[in-house]
Amino acid sequence: MKKIIIIGASGFGKEATWILERMSQSGQALGLLGFCDDAPDKQEGHFVGVPLLGNVEAAAARLAGARFFCAIGNNRIRQSVTARALAVGLLPFTLVDPTAIIAPGTKIGEGSFIGINSIVSAGATIGNHVIINHQACIGHDARLADFVQVCPGARISGGCEIGEGALLGTNASTIPLIQIGAWSTLGAGTTALTSLPAHTTHARLK
């Protein structure tokens, strides 16, 4: 049985717990050891009935070689905390809901999240520690770099390249063959009709 630690005792942590349970119910041998969190009030006790294990370093000292999923929505913070977890010997674990549809031969990186009823199409490449949330769709031959986040209902068309740490908000979409620059944000409900530069925010105006 694979033993899992979830980093982040908050809303996304609850969601990760739910997907882990769904994976277990589908026949995978998985067990949740507990949650890690840096918050002072989340160092001991329980969260959603699961033990709190202290921060990442404290948990790793007790549970050497355990696998982890970093359930932190903020892409920058997820990158930083993931680096800490890897540095102390924890091993990344990928959560894939049983209802996700993933084309054969698709590459899914370590520590990523593929949500309920999401689709990853033929030839797509998903980096490490990427979040593809519920009912999102990744088109054929799209390439998502590490720490990208695709929020619920977002649609990435075929052949697009999404740079490291970029965020596509709920129901955001792209036309085919464009690029979203690293650490850029495409706001909820916004359609990208052209490539977007790195480190910029593009949102639908009220």
Image: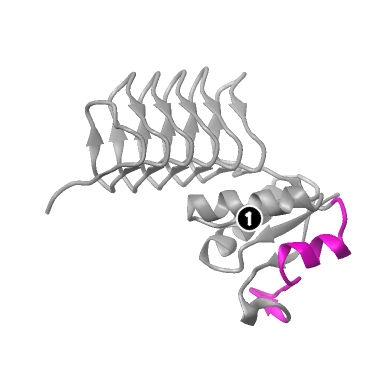
In reply to whether residue 54 is colored magenta, the answer given is yes
In percent of width and height, residue 195 lies at: 28, 26
In percent of width and height, residue 54 lies at: 73, 72
Q: Which residue is mark 1?
A: 81
Regarding residue 113, the answer to whether it shows in the image is yes
* Residue closer to the observer: 14 or 130: 130
State whether residue 95 is above or below residue 175: below
In reply to whether residue 204 is colored magenta, the answer given is no
* Quadrant of the image occupied by residue 142: top left
In percent of width and height, residue 55 lies at: 71, 68
* Residue closer to the observer: 98 or 153: 153
- Which residue shows up at 57% across the image and 32% down it? 127
What stretch of residues is rendered in magenta? 45-65
* Quadrant of the image occupied by residue 34: bottom right
Q: Amino acid at mark 1?
A: Val
Q: Is residue 166 left or right of residue 47?
A: left
Regarding residue 25, the answer to whether it shows in the image is no
